C-alpha cells in the first residue's frame, strides 16, 4: 500500500474538498498530470453538456516499460463525494474501466518516460449528466484497483443567469489588502422552493481549493438570489504570480538565471525573488502552466525534465513554513514543494522536478492554525488581477444528484 508522508502540520491543514483537483498518488513513478479542456491549457476544467467538447488527461510514467493502465469514471456531488443515488448507467453510456491505449515513449531525453493520454468522450464512453466527474487511473494488475492518479472536471447545463462584481472596497478594509465578490443569481426556469436545500453556490479564487467557499444568499426573492456584503466573499488580494519559461536546456529563458548539467539531470536556477512590499502590475495566468519546449512540436514526448531551483531572498520569516504553489502542484502542501532556509545564502530554497514549459508560481506560508497566507511573502493588494469562478448546483425536490446549472468566470481587469 502506497503512502504519502506528510508532516503533522500538513495533515492538519483544512484544504477544502469542494474544488476540482488533479492528484498523483504514486509520486515516485508518475509526473506531470494535466487535464486540458478543448485543447486549451488555460481554460478551466468545465465543459458544456450536449455540446462539442473534449477533455484530454495526460501524464508521464517515468520509464519505458509499458503498463496496462485503466480508468474509472465516477459522478460526484457538489462537495465531490460520490453520487450514491444514481447508477453508472444514468451518467455513463458505454463501458467503464477501459484500457488507456494512447501512449508513446519519450524520445532523446535524459529522463526517460512514457506519456499516456486519455481523451473523453471517446468511442467507448460518453457522459450523460451535468455535474462533477472524477477519473481515477489504476494498474490493471492491481487487484485492489488502488488509485495511481485522479483528475476532476465538470459538465454544466446552463439553467440560471449569473452576474458578479469584484470590489476593492470591502467590508473590512478600503482599497488595501482584500477583494469582495457580490453575486446575483436568477432562477430562470428552475423550480426552487427552498434555496438553502435546493441550491449550492461555490466561489473559488484562481482555482485554488484553499480559497474556495460555499455561500448562502442574504437576499431571496421569487426570481433569484443575491449574495452581498458577506464576510465569506472577502478574499485576500494576493499578488501577481512570479513566472518562468524553461523552453531550452541549452539557453536561459524568462525568469531563469542559469542552467547547469549535474549528472544525471539538468538544473535550472531561477532569479531570486524578494518579499513584496508594494504592488506592481505584471500580467500573469493566475497560477497556470503550459508544458512545451522551444520547438513546440511533440511537446509531450520530447520535453526534458529539469530540477528547478526556486529562491526567496529574505531573512527568516516568522510564522509557519513556506511553500511554492501553482496550479501545477499535486497534493499541496507536501514536502515536495516546501522551502528550506539556507543560512549561508540568506534565502529560502526549493528544488522541484518539472517538465519543460511555462509556469506561474507563488510563495505561500502556512500558519500553525492551518491558515494559508501570502502576507509576509508576496503580499496582499486590492489591485491584483484575480480570477473568480462561480459554480451553481441544483437538486430539485426528489432529485437524486447535484446538477451543475450555472458557471461563470469573473475578473477584476
Image (tube, rainbow, N blue to C red):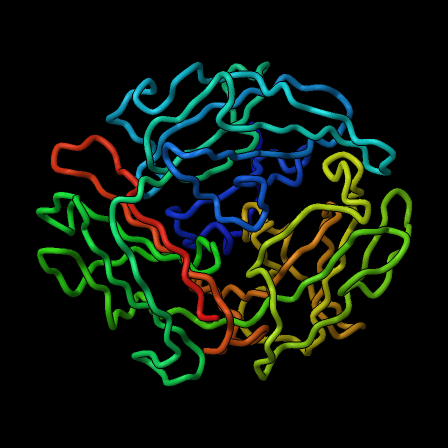
Give the image quarter of residue 275. Answer: bottom right
Q: Would you say 90 lies left or right of 261 here?
A: left
Give me the residue at 85% from left, 37% from top.
109
65 or 52: nearer the eye? 52
Please say if 184 is above or below 95: below
Q: Position of residue 15 (x, y in %)?
A: 43, 53
Percent of width and height locating residue 366: 51, 64
What is the quadrant of residue 102 in the picture? top right
203, 158: nearer the viewer: 158
Q: Is residue 141 above or below residue 146?
A: above
Residue at (26, 69) in percent of width and height: 230
**Furthest-front residue in this view:** 52
Split into 4 quadrants, where in the image is the N terminus?
top right
Residue 336 in the image: state x and y as whole percent.
Answer: 65, 50
Q: Residue at x 44, y 14 (%)?
A: 95
Q: Is residue 172 left or right of residue 372?
A: left
Q: Is residue 169 left or right of residue 368?
A: left
Is 183 left, or right, of 113 in this rendering?
Answer: left
Amino acid at each position: 500500500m502506497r503512502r504519502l508522508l506528510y508532516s503533522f502540520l500538513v495533515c492538519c491543514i483544512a484544504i477544502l474538498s469542494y474544488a476540482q483537483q488533479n492528484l498523483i498518488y504514486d509520486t515516485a513513478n508518475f509526473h506531470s498530470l494535466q487535464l486540458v479542456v478543448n485543447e486549451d491549457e488555460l481554460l478551466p476544467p468545465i465543459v458544456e453538456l450536449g455540446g462539442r467538447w473534449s477533455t484530454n488527461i495526460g501524464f508521464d510514467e517515468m520509464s519505458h516499460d509499458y503498463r496496462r493502465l485503466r480508468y474509472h469514471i465516477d459522478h460526484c456531488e457538489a462537495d465531490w463525494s460520490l453520487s450514491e443515488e444514481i447508477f453508472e448507467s444514468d451518467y455513463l453510456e458505454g463501458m467503464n474501466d477501459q484500457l488507456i491505449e494512447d501512449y508513446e515513449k519519450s524520445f532523446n531525453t535524459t529522463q526517460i518516460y512514457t506519456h499516456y493520454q486519455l481523451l473523453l468522450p471517446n468511442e467507448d464512453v460518453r457522459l450523460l449528466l451535468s455535474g462533477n466527474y472524477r477519473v481515477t487511473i489504476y494498474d490493471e494488475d492491481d487487484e485492489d484497483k488502488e488509485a495511481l492518479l485522479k483528475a476532476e472536471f465538470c459538465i454544466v447545463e446552463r439553467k440560471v443567469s449569473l452576474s458578479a462584481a469584484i470590489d476593492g472596497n470591502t467590508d473590512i478594509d478600503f482599497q488595501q489588502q482584500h477583494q469582495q465578490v457580490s453575486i446575483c443569481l436568477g432562477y430562470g426556469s428552475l423550480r426552487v422552493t427552498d434555496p438553502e436545500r435546493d441550491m449550492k453556490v461555490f466561489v473559488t479564487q484562481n482555482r485554488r481549493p484553499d480559497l474556495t467557499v460555499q455561500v448562502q444568499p442574504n437576499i431571496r426573492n421569487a426570481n433569484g438570489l443575491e449574495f452581498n456584503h458577506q464576510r465569506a466573499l472577502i478574499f485576500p488580494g494576493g499578488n501577481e504570480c512570479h513566472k518562468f519559461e524553461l523552453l531550452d536546456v541549452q539557453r536561459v529563458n524568462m525568469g531563469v538565471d542559469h542552467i547547469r548539467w549535474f549528472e544525471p539531470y539538468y538544473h535550472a536556477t531561477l532569479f531570486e525573488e524578494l518579499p513584496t512590499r508594494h504592488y506592481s502590475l505584471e500580467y500573469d495566468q493566475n497560477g497556470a502552466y503550459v508544458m512545451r519546449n522551444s520547438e513546440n512540436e511533440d511537446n509531450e514526448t520530447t520535453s526534458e525534465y529539469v530540477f528547478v531551483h526556486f529562491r526567496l531572498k529574505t531573512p527568516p520569516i516568522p510564522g509557519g513554513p513556506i511553500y511554492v504553489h501553482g496550479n501545477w502542484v499535486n497534493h499541496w502542501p507536501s514536502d515536495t514543494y516546501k522551502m528550506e532556509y539556507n543560512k549561508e545564502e540568506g534565502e529560502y530554497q526549493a528544488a522541484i522536478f518539472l517538465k519543460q514549459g511555462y509556469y506561474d508560481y507563488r510563495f505561500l506560508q502556512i500558519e500553525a492554525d492551518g491558515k494559508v497566507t501570502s502576507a509576509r511573502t508576496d503580499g496582499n493588494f486590492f489591485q491584483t488581477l484575480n480570477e473568480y469562478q462561480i459554480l451553481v448546483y441544483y437538486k430539485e425536490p426528489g432529485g437524486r444528484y447535484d446538477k451543475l446549472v450555472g458557471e461563470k468566470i469573473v475578473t477584476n481587469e
